[in-house]
Image (cartoon, rainbow, N blue to C red):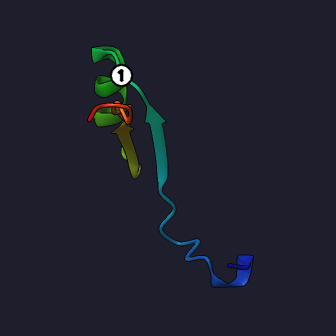
Amino acid sequence: MTAAQVLWSGPRLICVAGDFTRYDVHAVREHQCSIDPVRYRLFDTTAP
């Protein structure tokens, strides 16, 4: 993807972390921009 193909009129920030504090979540809600907190989990791949 090139910069010419990006829709710059509607930017979005995706924050990826193992967890977020309640203060993080509150800050995202208070900010009037497109910010998406995404939690990740590691799964055990050695389980039978």
Q: Amino acid at mark 1?
A: Phe
Q: Residue at x 68, y 78 (%)?
A: 1
Quadrant holding the C terminus:
top left
Mark 1, residues whose alpha carbon is within 10 Å: few (<14), some, or many (≥20)?
few
Q: Quadrant of residue 5?
A: bottom right
Relative to 22, is 33 above or below?
below
Task: Using the image as rendered, state which of residue 40 and residue 28 is in the foreground.
Answer: 40
In the image, residue 42 lies at what x, y percent? 38, 31
Query: Which residue is under mark 1?
Result: 20
- Image spot of residue 4 (x, y percent): 71, 84
User: Which x, y percent locates residue 17?
Assistant: 45, 30
**Quadrant of the image occupied by residue 2:** bottom right
| Residue at image point 55% right, 77% down | 7
**11 relative to 5, above or below:** above
x and y percent of residue 38 in the render? Answer: 36, 40
Residue at coordinates 29% horizontally, 31% vertically from top-left? Answer: 47
Find numbered disc 1 in the image and state the secondary structure of the residue it sits on.
Answer: loop
